[in-house]
Amino acid sequence: MILEAVMLQVKAGLEENYENAFRQASKIISSMPGYINHELQRCIEAKGKYLLLVSWESLEDHVIGFRESSEYQEWKKLLHPYYDPFPVVEHFKKVHIS
């Protein structure tokens, strides 16, 4: 399993619209092969800042399966207009400490 982590900055005044669009977009991502789960967190200290966490079975499920799909085009149309600056997506693998 890998974790996709994205810090998102939404344009001022569009937070409520963004959250509504994200609810729609959630249906898209959750239908993709290799998808496990996701959550969107709103920052308490910084208005318009969000953290998106998505668990995927593999890196390929995200960067190829989702990003190269027609569904991703709909995801982009719903969400990308809200971001400024455009976010950096990073992937993480769990470190076993016990």
Image (cartoon, grey):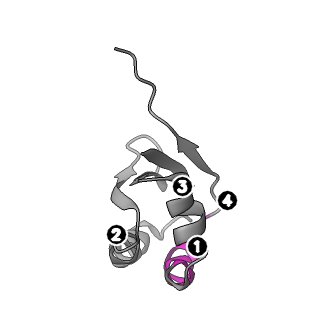
Q: CA distance from mark 3 to mark 2?
A: 19 Å
Dot label at residue 30: 2
Q: Amino acid at mark 4?
A: Pro
Residue that protrudes farthest toward the top in the picture = 98
Overall secondary structure of the magenta section: helix
Q: CA distance from mark 1 to mark 2?
A: 18 Å
Q: Nearer the viewer, residue 90 or 51?
A: 90
Residue bearing mark 1: 80
Q: Amino acid at mark 1?
A: His
Q: Nearer the viewer, residue 78 or 70?
A: 70
Dot label at residue 85: 4
Residue bearing mark 3: 8
Q: Looking at the image, is mark 1 or mark 2 nearer the viewer?
A: 2
Q: Quadrant of residue 22?
A: bottom left
Residue 27 placed where, x, y %? 33, 76
- Whichever of labels 1 and 4 marks the residue nearer the N terminus, that label is 1
Q: Amino acid at mark 2?
A: Ser
Report the number of numbered marks: 4
